[in-house]
Amino acid sequence: MHLLDTIPSPSPALPLPATQRLARLDTIGAPGRLARGFGASTAFLSLSPGLACVFADPDGAALTHQALGAAGMSAHQLWNAAAAELAARAHTERGVEFLVRSPAVTCAAAWGGAELPRGFEVAGHGVAAAHWLAHPQTFTLLHRHFEAVLHPEAMLAYATDDGERLFVFDAAPHAVAAALPRADVVTYSVGFPLLYHPGRS
């Protein structure tokens, strides 16, 4: 599926090869530590309460503030450069395009066939699709695309069960959380991901 849009100029190669990643801040460990093996020296930018953007090298290792400093970059500079490179991947001659499939393919295996709202599982153009939520440029591109494709009757809610797979649904976040109780549910707010917390409005 695609949405017509202008094709941007190719972005320059990153001085420090890296991908942006969406990470959930660890609320159990020490302050400043990130979940999934990212430590206190890991370079990151806070996105919203509970969520951050971290960076990984081509081998998947977390980049530290020291590595960024040695490359002459700040975390903010790398964040913007990585997002520009990622956004360019979705542009084709016909416009913006994301490959999708029914979320039931994955969810039936993972959750035993839960009743799901209308939506898709999204492919991420060579990276984990959930990482598109880690910068306003890429999240806005993705969000606008699926607004145009789904014409939501409710709102768009996003879910990731492993920090990598991404599902988008035409549903309120509480409905997605009820259908996928082990997933993190996220909504879009001016380009930033907001982690849904049951019981909060």
Image (cartoon, rainbow, N blue to C red):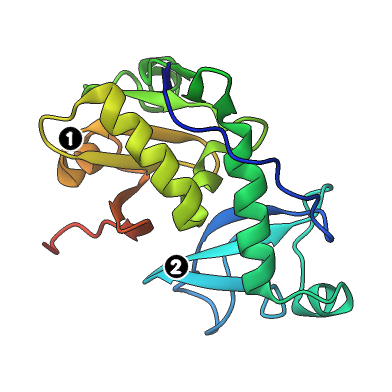
Residue 40 is situated, as x and y percent measured from the top left of the image, at 66, 80
Looking at the rendered structure, the secondary structure element under dot 1 is loop
Looking at the rendered structure, the secondary structure element under dot 2 is strand
45 left or right of 17 in image = left
Which residue is the site of mark 1? 171
Residue at 39% from the left image edge and 32% from the top image edge: 167
10 Å crowding of disc 1: few (<14), some (14-19), many (20+): some
- Marks 2 & 1, CB-CB < 8 Å contact: no
Residue at 75% from the left image edge and 78% from the top image edge: 65
Q: 55 above or below 182?
A: below
Res. 50 image quadrant: bottom left
CA gap between label 2 and label 1 equals 23 Å
Amino acid under disc 2 = Leu
The label on residue 47 is 2
Residue 96 is situated, as x and y percent measured from the top left of the image, at 48, 27
Amino acid under disc 1 = Ala
The C terminus, quarter of image: bottom left
Q: Nearer the viewer, residue 58 or 78?
A: 78
Task: Determine if residue 169 is in view.
Answer: yes
Residue 77 is situated, as x and y percent measured from the top left of the image, at 67, 69
Residue at 77% from the left image edge and 66% from the top image edge: 63
Query: Furthest residue to the bottom?
Result: 31
Q: Nearer the viewer, residue 128 or 113?
A: 128
88 left or right of 57 in image = left
Q: Nearer the viewer, residue 180 or 140?
A: 140
94 left or right of 88 in image = left
